[in-house]
Image (cartoon, helix red, strand yellow):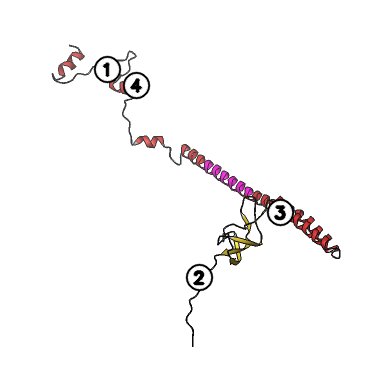
């Protein structure tokens, strides 16, 4: 009886029989079929407790030092970018302030240059103050029109609120007068000082006006308190 027959004879009748691992032809130890199959198809058991330790290098080891170096490099790059962004923002703010200052200066110079001819004409009129009064009046009217044209060129318009409803936000009431025939109470009847608006319609200066009010009626008159004797 061979060795195989002896093993089969020793196995209980109800026990599961597993095939013996085939012997290697080179004389080495036989191969465990179950372990070989688990190794080849990836079903070999894994020690989950030892896996993290194997995947994560120790902090003091070569892998841990490389990770710390990468983090330090990333932080240094972020800090450099942050400093560059702050410097660029500061340069933009300074550039905007310089541009705003230059625009303000240029606008003031343009306005002053536009009104210089008005000043020249007023000086000319004063030098001829002893001339014909009619000529003086005509000269002053011409200078006034010149100044009005300059304001129009700068984008400002004079408003005439006569006949409009009084608006406290755009008008200043200097007085009231009884409403005449066909005049609705609460409307502007006279302009004492004109108002001006810019090109967008925003108020530059409110007009000083006189406002119409309703005439008192007989019912509004105080009743007689009687005659004393």
The segment highlighted magenta reads 72-92
Q: Earlier in the sequence, mark 4 or mark 2?
A: 4
Percent x, y for residue 144?
75, 58
Q: Residue 218: which numbered mark, if any?
A: 2
Q: Earlier in the sequence, mark 4 or mark 1?
A: 1
Residue at 61% across, 61% down: 189
Mark 3 lies on residue: 151
Percent x, y for residue 147?
74, 56
- Cα gap from disc 2 to disc 1, whole angstroms: 133 Å
Point out the frontmost of discs 4 and 1.
Answer: 4
Q: Earlier in the sequence, mark 3 or mark 1?
A: 1
Point out the frontmost of discs 3 and 1.
Answer: 3
Q: Earlier in the sequence, mark 2 or mark 3?
A: 3
Give neighbour class at mark 4: few <14, some 14-19, many 20+ (Cα, 10 Å).
few
- Residue 121 or residue 166, whichever sits in front: 166
- Cα gap from disc 3 to disc 4, whole angstroms: 95 Å
**Residue 32 highlighted magenta (yes or no):** no
Give neighbour class at mark 1: few <14, some 14-19, many 20+ (Cα, 10 Å).
few
**Residue 88 highlighted magenta (yes or no):** yes
What predominant SS class does the magenta segment belong to? helix
Can you say whether 229 is above or below 18 in the image? below
Camera sees residue 84: yes
């Amino acid at each position: 009886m061979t060795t195989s027959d002896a093993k089969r004879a020793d196995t209980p009748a109800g026990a599961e029989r597993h095939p013996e691992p085939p012997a290697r032809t080179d004389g080495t130890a036989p191969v465990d079929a179950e372990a070989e199959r688990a190794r080849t198809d990836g079903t070999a058991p894994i020690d989950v407790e030892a896996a993290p330790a194997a995947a994560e290098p120790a902090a003091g080891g070569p892998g841990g030092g490389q990770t710390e170096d990468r983090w330090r490099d990333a932080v240094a790059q972020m800090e450099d970018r942050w400093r560059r962004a702050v410097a660029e923002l500061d340069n933009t703010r300074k550039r905007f302030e310089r541009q705003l200052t230059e625009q303000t200066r240029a606008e003031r110079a343009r306005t002053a240059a536009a009104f210089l001819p008005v000043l020249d004409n007023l000086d000319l009129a004063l030098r001829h103050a002893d001339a014909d009064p009619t000529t003086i009046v005509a000269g002053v009217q011409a200078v006034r029109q010149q100044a009005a044209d300059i304001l129009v060129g700068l984008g400002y318009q004079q408003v005439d609120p006569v006949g409009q409803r009084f608006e406290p936000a755009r008008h200043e009431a200097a007085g009231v007068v009884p409403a005449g025939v066909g005049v609705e109470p609460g409307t502007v009847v006279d302009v004492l000082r004109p108002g001006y608006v810019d090109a967008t319609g925003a108020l530059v200066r409110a007009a000083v006006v006189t406002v119409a009010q309703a005439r008192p009626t007989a019912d509004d008159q105080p009743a007689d308190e009687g005659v004393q004797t």
